[in-house]
Image (spheres, helix red, strand yellow):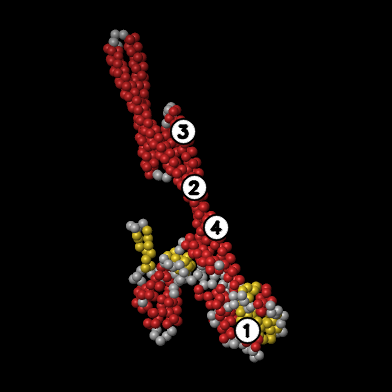
């Protein structure tokens, strides 16, 4: 139940603050028409009487017929809202029936009351009446004065403010702790990135040394191949010369000839072995050349991947894969090089574990931040609900975003419907345009790009036919009211365009912060506290 607003001050002025009323606010209806049927009295249902009272503008929540052992007792209880507005409706109901001579005193003083309904606000007399009315009131209500209700409301608001202050303080401390942890995590992450850069630089240096070593080894193989080729060529020429000498001496000695033939066969076999060795050396050179080209291609691919990937996790994965390749290619007897690569690989694995730990810590901080933000949003929602009945003329209040007021249509109604009731016509126009705003199929908006296409903004399509008709027929004031409500509904609830309550800074015409709302409540509470003193 909210505090009494400026529009309801006539309640406290017209009522005795110490008079006892039944709370929640209730009214009594007597002389409800009944008839005898099948051995008991029956009458109208509570919903019929409730609808009748609603049409008269008294806003009942529900109407409960009272029954006894004979059936319908002829009495009914009206329940009003628990808020101060409910008491206001109840008192209006009582005054209206008193004006018709159908009030409490009229009921007990009018002898011919058989066909009239009588109604009044339930008080302590009804509470202790001892009939079905009193039994129901004692079971479902209590006796309180207006002063007691105000005092209880003030105590409740004081506790709520204290709880909100404690909640905000705790959330601020948690937020500060998360900021400190975030800074520590950022520093640690920067250190990891720096170490990663150093590792990449060291790996590039080792790769350059490996490439140079492979190039030197291939050059040495090529030099050895050239030297062996020259030696084989000298040997071949020498054998050819000996063969020629043997042929010249063939006629001299048959035995010498046989010996020369034998030596010739051996020389041919030697030449064949030399040719095979020559071919083998050529194949070995080609294989070294292909391995060198393959290594260079892989190194180029590695450079391209390292340059393209900036994220630490992907860099570590690429380095680990390339280290495995280099490890297999570098096992040609270079033991120290293999040990270095294994050391680098172990260090990379440690960095991956550290990175995983940092990722988990960052994720935990993000979850805590989201949880804190959800709690702050719940506090804002609760504050908005509590301030829902604060007058719109104060500095901080609640604005219904997307709501359309009929006041903006009164000038157009006076101009268009001369002689008719302009307020009623304005309500009809307002109802029509309000239904158009809620219609999601009507979309007189367009989206434009700003900041070079980086962002998008929704604006009115002033060329829309209905908006053009609205401005021409109803005028600028109605046009501004409809377009403002349309933009607010599209911003706060674009899917359904329903009215959304928002904590609002009425002085600066903007969305109020949670801090401003709490500060306003504390200020009002302090002023009320000083006033009581």
Instruction: Tell me which numbered mark, 2 or 1, is placed earlier along the sequence.
Output: 1
Which quadrant of the figure has residue 216? top left
Local secondary structure at mark 4:
helix
Please tell me how crowded label 1 is: few (under 14), some (14-19), or many (20+) other residues with Cα within 10 Å. Answer: some
The x and y percentages for residue 118 are: 62, 84
Label 2 and label 3: CA atoms lie apart by: 32 Å
Element marked by disc 2? helix
Residue at 34 percent across and 71 percent down: it is 463
Point out the tag, 2 or 4, that comes first from the N-terminus: 4
State if disc 3 and disc 2 touch (CB < 8 Å): no
Task: Say if residue 469 shows up in the picture.
Answer: no
Label 4, residues with CA under 10 Å away: few <14, some 14-19, many ≥20: few
The residue labelled by disc 4 is 166
- Cβ atoms under marks 4 and 1 closer than 8 Å: no
Return the residue nearer the eye: 474 or 117.
Answer: 117
The residue at the far front in this view is 533
- Residue 368 to residue 487: above or below: above
| Residue situated in front as seen by the camera: 321 or 398 | 398
Image coordinates for residue 27, horizontal then vertical, percent: 61, 79
Q: Which residue is mark 3?
A: 343
Q: Is residue 431 visible?
A: yes
Query: Closer to the observer: label 3 or label 4?
Result: 4
Residue pointed to by mark 2: 181
Residue position marked by numbered label 1 in the rendering: 104
Neighbor class of circle 2 (other Cα within 10 Å; few <14, some 14-19, many 20+) is some
**Label 4, label 1: how many angstroms apart (C-alpha)?**
49 Å
């Amino acid at each position: 139940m909210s505090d009494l607003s400026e529009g309801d001050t006539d309640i406290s002025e017209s009522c005795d603050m110490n008079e006892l009323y039944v709370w929640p606010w209730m009214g009594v209806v007597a002389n409800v028409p009944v008839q005898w049927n099948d051995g008991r009295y029956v009458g109208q249902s509570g919903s019929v009487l409730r609808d009748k009272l609603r049409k008269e503008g008294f806003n009942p929540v529900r109407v409960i017929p009272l029954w006894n052992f004979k059936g319908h007792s002829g009495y009914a209880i009206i329940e009003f809202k628990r808020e101060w507005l409910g008491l206001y409706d109840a008192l209006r109901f009582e005054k209206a029936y008193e004006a018709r001579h159908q009030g409490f005193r009229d009921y007990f003083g009018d002898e011919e009351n058989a066909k009239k309904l009588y109604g009044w606000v339930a008080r302590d007399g009804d509470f202790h009446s001892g009939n079905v009315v009193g039994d129901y009131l004692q079971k479902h209500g209590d006796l309180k004065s207006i002063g007691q209700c105000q005092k209880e409301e003030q105590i409740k608001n004081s506790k709520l403010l204290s709880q909100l202050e404690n909640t905000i303080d705790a959330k601020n401390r948690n937020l500060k702790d998360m900021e400190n942890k975030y800074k520590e995590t950022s520093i640690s992450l920067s250190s990891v990135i720096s170490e990663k850069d150093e590792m990449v630089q060291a790996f590039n240096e080792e790769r350059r040394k490996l490439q140079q070593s492979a190039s030197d080894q291939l050059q040495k193989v090529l030099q050895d191949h050239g030297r062996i080729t020259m030696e084989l060529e000298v040997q071949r020429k020498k054998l050819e010369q000996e063969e020629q000498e043997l042929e010249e001496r063939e006629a001299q000695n048959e035995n010498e000839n046989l010996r020369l033939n034998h030596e010739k066969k051996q020389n041919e076999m030697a030449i064949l072995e030399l040719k095979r060795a020559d071919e083998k050396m050529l194949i070995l050179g080609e294989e070294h050349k292909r391995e060198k080209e393959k290594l260079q291609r892989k190194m180029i691919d590695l450079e391209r991947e390292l340059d393209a990937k900036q994220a630490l996790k992907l860099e570590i994965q690429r380095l680990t894969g390339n280290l495995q390749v280099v490890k297999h290619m570098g096992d040609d007897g270079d033991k120290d090089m293999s040990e270095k690569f294994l050391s680098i690989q172990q260090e990379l694995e440690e960095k991956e574990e550290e990175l995983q730990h940092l990722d988990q810590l960052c994720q935990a901080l993000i979850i805590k931040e989201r949880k804190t933000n959800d709690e702050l949003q719940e506090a804002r929602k609760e504050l908005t609900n509590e301030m829902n009945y604060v007058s719109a003329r104060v500095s901080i209040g609640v604005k219904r975003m997307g709501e359309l007021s009929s006041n903006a249509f009164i000038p157009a109604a006076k101009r268009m419907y001369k002689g008719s009731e302009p307020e009623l016509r304005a309500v009809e126009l307002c109802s029509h345009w309000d239904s158009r705003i809620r219609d999601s199929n009507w979309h007189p908006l367009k989206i434009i790009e700003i900041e070079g296409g980086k962002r998008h903004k929704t604006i009115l399509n002033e060329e829309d036919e209905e908006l053009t008709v609205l401005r021409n027929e109803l005028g600028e004031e109605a046009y501004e009211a409809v377009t403002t409500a349309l933009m607010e509904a599209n911003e706060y609830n674009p899917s359904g365009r329903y009215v959304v309550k928002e904590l609002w800074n009425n002085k600066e015409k903007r969305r109020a912060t949670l801090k401003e709302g709490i500060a306003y409540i504390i200020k009002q509470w302090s002023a009320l506290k000083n006033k009581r003193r």
